[in-house]
Amino acid sequence: MNLKVTEVIDETWDTKTFLMEDADEGSCPFDYIAGQYLTFRFDGISERPVARSYTMSSSPNQAGFAAVTVKRVDGGLVSNYFCDQVFPGAILKARGPIGRFTWDPARCRQQLVMVGAGSGVTPFVSILRAYANTLGQPGSPEKMTLLVAYRSKQDLICWKDLDALQKIPGIRVFTTLTREDARDEGFLHGRPDEAMLEGVCENTYEDATYMTCGPDALMKLVVEFLQKKGVPDQHIMLESFGE
């Protein structure tokens, strides 16, 4: 399918969100579940066609468009092309939506705990927004918790959304900064470790499904921690990312 970029939002100094609609008919041309991704194909930026997948940071309850959020990667062919060469009016080739990194009431517990870092927050922004106004209702989680790590306050991807979402009853958002100490402003400080995970996940181990997205080291930490707590593997979901 062909998607037309309608708006580009500067999230941080190295991250942008791209709003898209059907290139011919407008609006969002597909139905999707929060947490799914699109795969984009680029034919003219290298000798051979290049494909990259990006989770949608928009939510199904946002009518009229879909959005992906792209963080620039040093030396990354596609992420740098997105950030430097894709402007409103650009036509992008994509397929999807694809993926099972979603909250499914048929297979998930009623609490949802998410752990991400950097651009790994994007599926969780989509999921939080999708269920924020229906928590506790059939087809929605009862509670949602997010722990997300950024380097500094300059790297707060989708922060406007997260700041609003964390004020909704039933949603908790813990934000840790790894290279800046802003504990006096309500942030945690340091890389996620077992002690931080214990503080976030306490009293959830028998009632929650866990999702983690980010660097391999973070996901390994989360999985091993939850396994020590006796969480069954079917309630631990992973989604890796990278250029």
Image: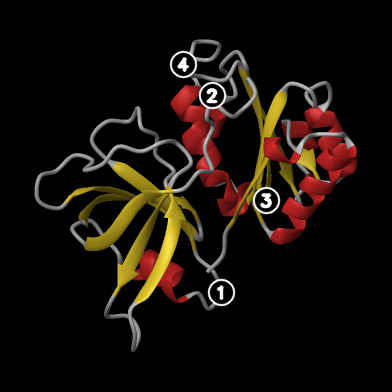
- Residue picked out by circle 1: 74
Q: Earlier in the sequence, mark 1 or mark 4?
A: 1
Which of label 1 and label 4 is nearer to you?
4
Label ID, residue 133: 4
As drawn, is 196 to the left or to the right of 174? right
User: How far separated are the C-alphas under marks 1 and 2?
Assistant: 38 Å
- Residue picked out by circle 2: 105
- Residue picked out by circle 3: 152
User: How far separated are the C-alphas under marks 2 and 4?
Assistant: 16 Å
Label 1, secondary structure: give it. loop
Q: Quadrant of residue 185?
A: top right
Work out whether residue 232 or residue 61 is closer to the camera in this orientation and state it.
232
Residue type of the residue flagged with mark 2: Pro
x and y percentages locating residue 96 in the rendered image: 34, 52
**Outermost residue toward the left in this view:** 24
Q: How many marks?
A: 4
Which of label 3 and label 2 is nearer to you?
2
How many residues crowd around disc 1 within 10 Å: few (fewer than 14), some, or many (20 or more)? few
Q: Earlier in the sequence, mark 3 or mark 2?
A: 2
Residue 160 visible within the image: no
User: How far separated are the C-alphas under marks 3 and 4?
Assistant: 29 Å
Label 3, secondary structure: give it. loop
Residue type of the residue flagged with mark 4: Asn
**Outermost residue toward the top in this view:** 137
